Image (cartoon, rainbow, N blue to C red):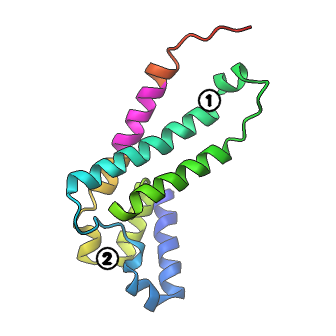
Amino acid sequence: MQCLGAICGAGVVKGFQPHLYEKLGGGANTLSKGYTKSAGLGAEIVGTFVLVYTVFSATDAKRNARDSHVPILAPLPIGFAVFLVHLATIPVTGTGINPARSLGAALIYNKDQAWDDHWIFWLGPFLGAALAALYHQVVIRAIPFSSK
């Protein structure tokens, strides 16, 4: 459903602003000049790791029970993580961190530059999310906490 929503969203944007849409490359993620494919893949892995780990940490039910004296507003750290990841990775890849968003923009724009390194915007987020899940489950959740 995310992929379908991204495709529809990119189509709506193209329909409302066709000239600006073409001028700006349709919002499709591309590897910026001067960066290698491995740098782009690394940026996507690290960016997605930061976002997914933040989501896990901010929404962990055990954390809420453990830190119940401190109310947590999950959207605040998640939004901040998205902001920081964008600051760091826009110059490198345009910030994918979500394969659905990257696919929608690439399909509607449908020019060679949108497809040249498109695999980066699938592999990077999948690896980053898997590493974040593994780290959260194995390292963070394995740490025993004493209750007072």
Q: Which residue is mark 1?
A: 60
Three-letter amino acid code of the residue under disc 1: Asp
Residue drawn at (38%, 48%) of the image: 125
Kindly report the distance in space between the C-alpha atoms of the residues bearing marks 2 and 1: 39 Å
* Dot label at residue 110: 2
Callout 1 secondary element: loop
Which badge, 2 or 1, is on the more N-terminal residue? 1
Q: Position of residue 7 (x, y in %)?
A: 46, 69
Residue drawn at (36%, 78%) of the image: 109
**Counting other residues with Cα less than 10 Å from the Cα at mark 1, is it few (<14), some (14-19), or many (20 or more)?**
some
Q: Main secondary structure of the magenta part?
A: helix
Q: Position of residue 142 (x, y in %)?
A: 50, 15
Q: Of the residues tagged 2 and 1, which is closer to the observer?
A: 1
Q: Position of residue 123 (x, y in %)?
A: 30, 48
Note whether residue 57 is visible.
yes
Determine which quarter of the picture holds residue 91.
bottom left
